């Protein structure tokens, strides 16, 4: 009797096992053979579903960012005003930035042998949080809570500010960093709140 092959399930298993291995061993320390062995499928299956190891990692990073966006979308309605959403977003970023694959993505992005298209795709993941920030600022403008002349620049500045704080997630005490995230929103609001 021929064994039934479920392509979607195979892809899911390979991705889950690869994520665990990347988290444990890093990108360079994980081979396609390791992924194949851990997933219980041939290397051919891995290549069939993901073409190469970089594309497999990009898929995992994109899925992680998609989930980030879904979590924020579910949480956002709990905060009625744009100001409340901005404070909630800062805490959300702090609590959802440190993922097991974060260091792996950084390793891959700075490696000179990484395909430039892969690096572009990894940096492109910032679109999801930037859209979420822009939506908060747009809400504040629509409700006359914020006075913003340039939505795009304001969004970029806010994202850059939070991104700079995120660089300290692995090195700074959580409570101290949480206070800094909160303070950064307070300072930022000083420039955009309507009097």
Image (tube, helix red, strand yellow):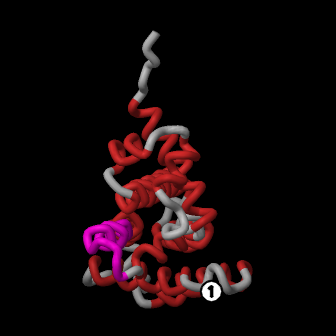
Mark 1 lies on a secondary structure that is: helix
The answer to whether one can see residue 88 in this image is no
Tell which of 108 and 65 is nearer to you.
108
- Residue labelled with disc 1: 180
User: Could you say which quadrant of the image residue 49 lies in?
Assistant: top left
Q: Percent position (x, y) of residue 74?
A: 51, 50
Image point (59%, 81%), residue name = 181
Image point (49%, 38%), residue name = 41
Tell which of 184 and 58 is nearer to you.
58
Q: What stretch is highlighted in magenta?
A: 112-126
Magenta stretch holds residue 58: no
Image point (56%, 48%), residue name = 17
User: Could you say which quadrant of the image residue 151 lies in?
Assistant: bottom left
Residue 134 vs 195, above or below: the answer is above
Residue 59 vs 136, above or below: the answer is above
From the image, which quarter does the C terminus lie in?
bottom left
Tell which of 122 and 67 is nearer to you.
122
User: Could you say which quadrant of the image residue 124 lies in?
Assistant: bottom left
Left or right of 29? Residue 66 is left
Neighbour tally class for label 1: few under 14, some 14-19, many 20 plus, Cα within 10 Å:
some
Q: Percent position (x, y) of residue 30?
A: 53, 62
Image point (54%, 55%), residue name = 19
Q: Percent position (x, y) of residue 177?
A: 66, 83
């Amino acid at each position: 009797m021929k064994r039934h092959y479920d392509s979607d399930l195979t892809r899911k298993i390979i991705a889950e096992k690869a994520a665990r291995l990347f988290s444990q061993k890093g990108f360079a320390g994980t081979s396609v053979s390791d992924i194949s062995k851990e997933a219980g499928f041939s290397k051919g299956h891995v290549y069939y579903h993901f073409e190469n190891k970089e594309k497999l990692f990009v898929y995992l990073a994109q899925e992680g960012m998609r989930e980030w966006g879904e979590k924020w979308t579910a949480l956002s309605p709990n905060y009625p005003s744009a100001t409340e959403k901005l404070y909630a977003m800062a805490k959300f970023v702090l609590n959802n930035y440190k993922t097991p694959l974060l260091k792996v993505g950084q390793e891959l992005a700075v490696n000179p042998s990484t395909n430039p298209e892969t690096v572009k795709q990894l940096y492109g993941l910032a679109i999801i949080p930037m859209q979420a920030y822009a939506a908060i600022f747009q809400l504040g403008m629509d409700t006359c809570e914020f006075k913003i002349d340039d939505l795009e620049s304001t969004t970029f500045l806010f994202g850059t500010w939070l991104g700079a704080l995120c660089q300290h997630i692995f090195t700074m005490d959580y409570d101290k960093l949480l206070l800094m995230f909160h303070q950064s929103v307070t300072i930022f609001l000083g420039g955009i709140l309507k009097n």
